Image: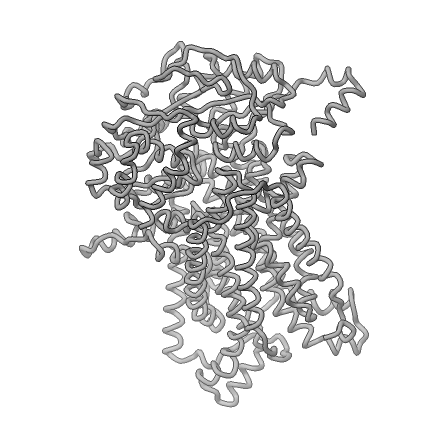
Amino acid sequence: MADRAQPLRSRWGLGVATLVATFILGALAAVILRAEVGRGLGVADWAAIRFTIWQAVLSAVASVTLAVPVARALARRRFRGRRLLIALMGAPFILPVIVAILGILAVFGRSGWLSDLLGVFGLGPLQIYGLHGVVLAHVFFNLPLATRLILQGWQEIPAERFRLAAQLNAGPLAMWRLLEAPMLRQVVPGALAVVFAICLSSFAVALTLGGGPRATTIELAIYQAFRFDFDLGRAAMLSGVQLLLTGAAALVALRVASGEGFGAGLDRPVRRWDGEGRWARGLDAIYLSGAAQFLVLPLSAIVIAGLPGLLSMGASVWMAAATSALIAGLSTLVLLLIALPMAIAVALGRGAVVEVAGLLGLAVSPLVIGTGLFILIYPVADPFALALPVTALVNALMALPFALRILIPRVREILARYGRLSLSLDMRGGAFLRRVLLPRLRPQLGFAAGLAAALSMGDLGVIALFADSETATLPLQVYRLMGAYRMEAASGGALLLLCLSMGAFYICDRGGRRHAET
Amino acid sequence: MKHLVLAAGLLGATAAYAETPELIVYTYDSFVSDWGPGPAVEKAFEATCSCDLKLVGAGDGAALLARVKLEGARSDADVVLGLDTNLTAAAKATGLFAEHSISADYALPFEWEDTTFAPYDWGYFAFVHNADATAPKSFTELAESDLKIVIQDPRSSTPGLGLLMWVKAAYGDKAPEVWEGLADNVLTVTKGWSEAYGLFLEGEADMVLSYTTSPAYHLIAEDDASKAAAVFDEGHYMQVEVAGKLAASDQPELADQFLAFMVSDAFQSIIPTTNWMYPAVTPTAGLPQGFETLVAPEKSLLLGAEEAAALRDAALEEWLTALSR
């Protein structure tokens, strides 16, 4: 597709993508250049690489497999609390890992609610530690994201298609074959790749619930190389391995996920005639309530644990909350400025390069990016002074892969539907952006912004390297409280974090959906 | 940005004189939190030094060392506070630290000889359990029991590394067998102390690797006597937390003044109920009420800094092998 035949150009996107890639790879290069000759990768590192891939594959498959029926049920049901449920799905993803783990354990742990329930029937407590515990936690984190990504796919099938299919008397099976399966073939690989990539860099979850050294991941190996051995070369090398793995996953996903869109519709509300049967209703109800309980129970545990602590937190926690909110706002703004041009460039057919650049943020370990930036910034400026902007920028880069996955299909579709018409009206560039693209892209922009805001709110990664005592973020403050035995106040802080992230997500997402059919 | 400060100083010497000197101390995160020793220490020191004390939290002990290595000789830090004796050999090897001339009447169970680092507090590693449960009296008893413990990963946390050294110091070459016996008691391994202690409080495990002083927090701050530390016959490995001044400090006198302050009564009396460790020098007022209830191991174990550094890789390998099965 040549740029000439389109109302927008890919220049900007290509430029931004180059900047992003330069930034991240530059940080990686800075680490490599600073490194002395290290030990190289040992047997333990290779074991870590194998385990990392294996658990990421399992987690991705489990999350996405479960997400398909849940997304389908959400796509064809309208019920009270649907919006709330969708908003709730933003929550697990952005909690500090330790908080989420404690929430999960309150439900599935040895002395958790489920074990107590089993005890009533004389059954032993659940055994959560091991590979299955890791996968369970990863599904908790990623099922919501996968569901939202797949739900987007469902919503992109024009309502007219379902109407037509219903008029032609297509049963659920035929509808599945004609409309839903082709859509899933496009959306699922991307979702798999994103979840796989997220789980590749998992570290605290895998370690804590994996049960010990067997569950060593690449990220822990990077951490150790950096923190204990100060072997920057090995840290960079491991980060390179992680980069290759994520890149490979991305390329596979992009290759599989090709295919045509569904043509234009009039943006009418979707009505599903195939979902009226008793069976369909029953199944959907089971999937939805199952997913809701799976997500809501651990979150409630966090709320219950946090309420008593809310009052005993002290001013520094509220200060940290303000800092986090500021960073989240900045980071969301940056994300939108980066993601939109890149999504347009991908939609215009400059796919692979731009999308891989977008995935880099997920692929390179935050510890390594942080360290690289530190090495780069330190000689020219005071890292403390730059703590806020750097954190905001890095957080935006971390959210970029998700934003792209959310935006690209829709941008592609809008261009396919309205591109020619707009050209014939000589509507290009800014006018096309304002009149055609942005209004139609609003729900996706809102979702992406919400995710970015929430992710940034919960991020612990980079700030730790740059922050001084005055600019703690809320997650960091929660860890500090725990380090000082203030578990109750820490739970309060975690609850506050949960509320802030949910709030940020809800505001952005809701803003994007105002007057739009969901 | 020292060269800028220097340039500014040369251009306007009077302005530079008028400014209060700033002493930057890198430390671990929990030290600077509102409930840690940080705020009280800052207030007390600034009252004596006519300077601005800036405490900077940088992760945990190991992360501190990595941070200093990353910044090298150009570091803004004047003092690093929060390394332990398992890390001091590596810290010394960087050549970034200067000798100190601090001496004090330390309340440590052994003679302090290190001239680069000065201790400010110490404690015994111990397994903390619920007071109403019967605790094992040794690693062997623990290994034979079906009690579940949570420990920290020695590759990412200082208590985790401390446990490795504990077993090594108590059993030497027999350490691998001890670890094999303990393997089925280890419920899980966490990244850091916070995660482990959180799991224990959630009721996931019977015991958690922490300090003999941990029950003091619950007793004194929460009026809760339900936690206790198990005493092991083998003796208990110690964590001695230390501080040192950087050779490239632009405030060497102030740094010395801080280290001297660190072993003085004003600083030491803050430690017990904020950092929940034993002060390196017993304050004149004695230990706070509640500390007398803590268990006191009969035997303290500590490997020398050089020895600990030399043993680390092998001990880690043994640990990995035993727990990976």
Question: Quadrant location of the C terminus of chain A?
Answer: bottom right
Q: Report the side of B287 relative to A171 (left or right).
A: left
- The x and y percentages for residue B40 are 50, 21
Q: Report the side of A454 relative to B289 (left or right).
A: right
Q: Residue at x 50, y 56 (%)?
A: A198
Q: Residue at x 48, y 73 (%)?
A: A76
Question: Quadrant location of the N terminus of chain A?
Answer: bottom right
- The x and y percentages for residue B49 are 59, 13
Q: Quadrant of residue B172?
A: top left
Q: Residue at x 64, y 40 (%)?
A: A375
Q: How is the image coloured?
A: one colour
B287 or A368, which is in the foreground? A368
B261 or B46, which is in the foreground? B261
A171 or A352, which is in the foreground? A352
B4 or A102, which is in the foreground? B4
Most distant residue in the bottom direction: A168
- The x and y percentages for residue A242 are 53, 55
Q: Report the side of B28 relative to B200 (left or right).
A: right
Tally of numbered discs: 0
Where A74 sits versus B29, above or below? below
Q: Is residue A164 visible?
A: yes
